[in-house]
C-alpha cells in the first residue's frame, strides 16, 4: 500500500486526492463487497475513482483465469 501512490502516478498519471484504503462498496441495496484498494485521483482536470482487489497468495488457476478475461 505504501508504494501504490507512486505507482499510480507513474503508470497512470493520477494525482491522489488522499490515502488509498480498504473499504466496502454497496453494489445493491444492503449488499456490499470488500475492495482492498479504494481512493480518488485527478488527471487533466478529471476526477477518477480507484478501485482494486488484491490477493495475498497468487495461484496458477487465478492467474490463468485473469489472463483469459483480459482484453488486449
Image: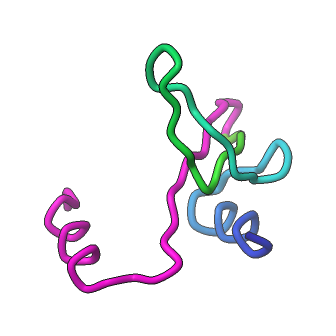
The one of 24 and 2 positioned closer to us in this rendering: 24
Could you tell whether 25 is left or right of 41 in the image?
A: left
Q: Position of residue 23 (x, y in %)?
A: 68, 43
Q: Quadrant of the C terminus?
A: bottom left
Residue 59 quadrant: bottom left
Q: Residue furthest top?
A: 29
Could you tell whether 65 is left or right of 10 in the image?
A: left
At x 19% / y 56%, what residue is drawn? 71
Q: Residue furthest front?
A: 30
Q: Position of residue 18 (x, y in %)?
A: 85, 46
Q: How is the image coloured?
A: rainbow
Q: Position of residue 37 (x, y in %)?
A: 63, 54
Q: Is residue 56 above or below residue 4?
A: below
Q: Quadrant of the N terminus?
A: bottom right
Q: Find the magenta span and give its range.
A: 44-72
Q: Is 48 included in the stretch rendered in magenta?
A: yes
At x 18% / y 59%, what residue is drawn? 69
Amino acid at each position: 500500500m505504501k508504494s501504490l501512490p507512486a505507482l499510480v502516478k507513474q503508470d497512470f498519471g493520477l494525482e491522489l486526492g488522499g490515502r488509498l484504503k480498504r473499504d466496502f462498496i454497496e453494489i445493491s441495496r444492503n449488499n456490499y463487497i470488500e475492495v482492498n484498494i479504494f481512493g480518488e485521483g485527478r488527471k487533466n482536470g478529471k476526477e477518477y475513482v480507484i478501485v482494486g482487489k488484491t490477493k495475498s497468495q497468487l495461484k496458477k488457476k487465478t492467474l490463468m483465469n485473469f489472463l483469459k478475461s483480459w482484453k488486449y
